[in-house]
Amino acid sequence: MRSYTTFHLQYAHRFYNFEGEAQYLHGHTGTMTIEVEESINPGVNMVFPCNEIRKTAWNILQNFDHALILREDDPLLPAVLKVYEEQKIRNGAPRNTMKGPAFKTELATAHPECRLVVTKETMTVEGMIKISYELLKDKLNIARITFTSGDNAGYAEFVPGTAVCRCPRCGIALDGTGRCPKCGWQKKD
Ligand SMILES: [Zn+2]
Ligand SMILES: [Zn+2]
């Protein structure tokens, strides 16, 4: 059985060196659905608490929300950084509080202080699915990610890893010592 959660990401991007309208800067509201596979936890009778999937995913993926996403070789990138620098908002605007932790993977680097994500490949829906899986695969037992943006939609299925030990009261993952970080329940060997 699977649990899933859906949330929205609003972002601006363009397809650099692409023949078509998408070569111009434009924006989207993207919708992401993350499906998590687990066995049903006997205590709480749920696969995985959906609010925990959302919290875990949003903590990292909020870096894409209200962000500009540019490919690493796009000449707009140094141009935008220069303007942000001159405006003194490159290293953080006072009201930019909705920041996720900075990350750097093979496919993407987040600069939360200036709401920018730099990608290795063009940020299509397929690209976003690959990036998101890379960022979340060690935190969630992901079976499928679906992403839609404008008329574009895609999904990818993944082989879920081994089941995570979870609290029978809250359903959230136990820490390394077998203790529930929420209610303090302790697993006995
Ligand atoms: Zn687009
Ligand atoms: Zn608990």
Image (cartoon, grey):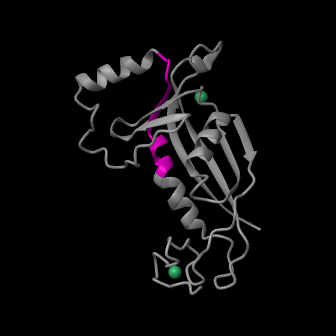
Using residue 151 as the reference point, say whether residue 54 is left or right of it: left
**Above or below — where is 133 with respect to 171?**
above
30 relative to 171, above or below: above
Identify which residue is drawn at 47% across, 39% down.
Answer: 104
Q: Name the image quarter holding residue 114.
A: top left
Q: Is residue 44 left or right of residue 105?
A: right
Ligand 1 shown in quarter = top right
Residue 33 is situated, as x and y percent measured from the top left of the image, at 65, 52
User: Start and end of the magenta stretch?
Assistant: 60-74
- In front: 166, or 56? 166
Q: Nearer the viewer, residue 180 or 152?
A: 180
Q: Position of residue 74 (x, y in %)?
A: 49, 18
Name the image quarter holding residue 188: bottom right
Residue positioned 49% across, 41% down in the render: 64
In this rendering, the answer to whether 2 lies above or below 13 is below
Farthest front residue in view: 189
- Image quarter in which the N terminus is found: bottom right
